[in-house]
Amino acid sequence: MQEPNTPSEVAANESAVQEEVQASATDAHEARIVALEAALEEAKAQVLYVKAEGENIRRRAADDIDKARKFALEKFSGELLAVKDSLDAALAVESEEVASYKNGVELTAKQLLSVFEKFNIAEINPVGEKFDPNKHQAISMVPAEGEPNTVLSVLQKGYSLNERVLRPALVTVIQAK
């Protein structure tokens, strides 16, 4: 390239250089804007995806909870069907012997006790124990020999499920003298 000779040529060259610098700066800014807009669109798409995925997870969890509630007793119910079948068989017997009925009822009671054990249902039969209002419900207090506030008799057994009381035992308690 040749060196400019006149001041007007120098000014023209400087002006052209400035225009070139401004044009390249404008192009760089426009390229940066385009890149940022693309990044913004990608971020928006990611946000929508994450939001949809969160909603799907929430919906699946709600469905799982509904199914768990609906079928929580499925195994227990299946086990009780054998007890029901035994009771139906006992009712279908034509024999009128009390002994055969008693044997059938005893077998059915054993089946039921087996189901209770399998599912951690325990009997509360507190004869001779101290009265516990968390496990027992006092129906009456009677004067009797023995330590006061002790269970004298059980009118109806109570039951607990995994050590949580399902039904308290109905009891008669020894009254203090």
Image (cartoon, grey):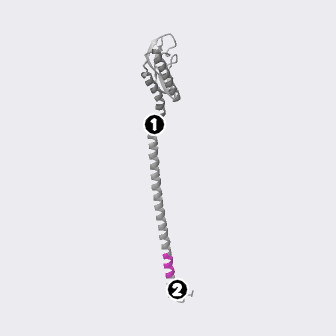
Q: Local crowd at mark 1 within 10 Å, few (<14), some, or many (≥20)?
A: few
Query: Mark number for residue 101?
Result: none
Residue that carries the numbered disc 2 in the rendered image: 10
The secondary structure type at the circle numbered 1 is: helix
Q: Among all residues in the image, which is located at the extreme front?
A: 94
Q: Residue drawn 51% across and 82% down? A: 14
Q: Decide: is 140 above or below 82.
A: above
For image coordinates 44% across by 40% down, the residue present is 66
Q: Position of residue 116 (x, y in %)?
A: 50, 27
Q: Report the Cα–Cα distance between label 1 and label 2.
A: 91 Å
Q: How many marks?
A: 2
Residue 127 horizontal/vertical position (percent): 51, 17
What amino acid does circle 1 point to?
A: Phe
Residue 17, relative to residue 123: is it above or below?
below
SS for callout 2: helix
116 vs 107, nearest the viewer: 107
Q: Nearer the viewer, residue 105 or 1?
A: 105
Q: Which residues are magenta?
A: 15-23
Principal secondary structure, stretch drawn in magenta: helix
The quadrant in which residue 71 appears is top left
- Which kind of residue does numbered mark 2 sit on? Val
Q: Is residue 166 above or below residue 176?
A: below
Instruction: Determine if the magenta segment contains residue 21.
Output: yes
Q: Residues within 10 Å of mark 2 (few under 14, many from 20)?
A: few
> Along the polypeptide, which appears first: circle 1 or circle 2?
2
From the viewer's side, name the closer residue of 39 and 161: 161
For label 1, the residue is: 71
